[in-house]
Each structure stands twice: as structure tokens, then as C-alpha cells.
Amino acid sequence: MNFNFPPTSPIAPLEGWFQEAETAATTSNPLAMALSTVNSAGIPSSRMVLLKGFDELGAVFYTNYISEKSNDIEANSNVSLLFHWDTTQRQIRIQGRATRLCDDESDAYFTTRDRLSQVSAWSSKQSQPLKSRAILMEKVATLTEKWVGKSVPRPEFWGGYRVSLDTIELWQGQDGRLHDRIVYTMVDGEWSWERLQP
């Protein structure tokens, strides 16, 4: 795919790329993305999370609000997302600000998770030291028994973030490393774009 006629908005191409990534997927998580944050000391950190929603308002993922990534976001909400697919020779980079979703949105998504994942959200103090895995699994077993025959409520310390789409770069691999790169920037509520050299 070349970018001879870039659209006025990157949203439609992005949605198309996500759909194609899922169709062409050779892995079980084609919507895995690298989330990069910076902590209060200015030290960067990256980890893989799953894209769970995308539209013109931003990209959504879910996590524990006491995790290292959440602590970073609370100190500095500027984050970066990166998608890369070898099968389609495509890459997407997104820069924006991460903000918490409202409780209703997080509640709605939590109900779609499998039961073990719901229980694990309660069981793990994400990113905190763990003396042994046995302690974690014992907690999982205790909570599983507690909610037999009942719905598992969403923990207050678990929910979603939405990353605003401030800057988006679409990268399409080409022969001879003559890659196509288009970067979109949101300015005063409208998209501007320019082509970058490979």
C-alpha cells in the first residue's frame, strides 16, 4: 500500500489496518501494542498491552490502577503506543495523553472478561513484589470460592485508559527500505499531515 492520496483523517485507514492485522494474524494477539510511559524520575518504560477499543476519541486499554504503568501515567500522562506487524509490513505509532475511563465504561468491559481474568484482577497487586507464586494462587482459589454462583464485581483499582490521538504515524514497508511514512497531527480540532522520508 502506498500513500499517494492520504485521506483527511487517519481514523479510517487505522481501522482498516487493524482489521487486516486480525485477518492476516499469525499470532493470537494481533492487537498487542507496546505502551511506553515515563516515570516521575524521567525514566522510560515499555510493556505490551492489548488494544480493547479504538475510535476518533482514542485508543483504549485496561490495567490495574496501582501498577507501575498507572503510576507512571499519573505522574506524566504523555504516552506512546506502537503496533508492528511483520505479515503486512506495517507499523503504527501513536502519541497522546492517557486519561482514565469513566466507571461505566470500565464496568461494561469487565463483564466481558472470562471469570478467571476477573478473579485475577482482584488477586494481583500488579507490579508489587511476590514472595511465592503459591501465595498468589491461594488467593485466586479463595476468591474463586467466595464468588461461586455470583457475579465478580470490578475492583475500584482496576479499569481503563483512553489515549488521545495527538500524533499518528502510519508506516508501510517497501522494497529497498524505501518505506512510506505519513504522520498526522491534530491541530485545533483538525488533522494536518505530512510525508516523512524513510
Image (cartoon, rainbow, N blue to C red):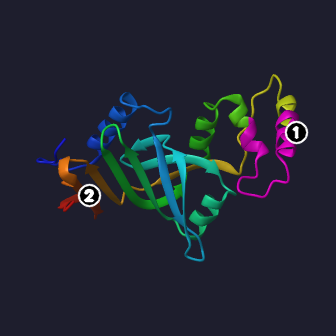
What's the residue at 52%, 58% (across, down)? Answer: 99
Residue at the far left in the pictured view? 4
Q: Residue at x 87, y 32 (%)?
A: 146
Q: Is residue 175 left or right of residue 108?
A: left
Amino acid residing under circle 2: Tyr
Identity of the residue drawn at 66% across and 55% down? 65
Q: Secondary structure at mark 2?
A: strand
Q: Is residue 101 above or below residue 26?
A: below
Segment tinted magenta in the rendering: 119-142
Judged from this view, the residue extending furthest toward the top is 149
107 vs 5, left or right, is right
Magenta stretch containing residue 140, yes or no?
Answer: yes
Does residue 58 appear in this view?
A: yes
Circle 1: element type:
helix
**Residue 184, disc:** 2
For mark 1, what is the residue? 138
In percent of width and height, residue 185 lies at 28, 61
| Above-or-below relation of 37 to 118 | below
Q: Could you tell me residue 118's position as x and y percent?
A: 70, 36
Placement of the N terminus among the 4 image quadrants: top left
Residue 155 appears at what percent x and percent y? 73, 45
Does the stretch in magenta take in 15? Answer: no
Which amino acid type is marked by label 1? Glu
Residue 179 in view, yes or no: no
- Mark 1–mark 2 Cα distance, whole angstroms, equals 49 Å
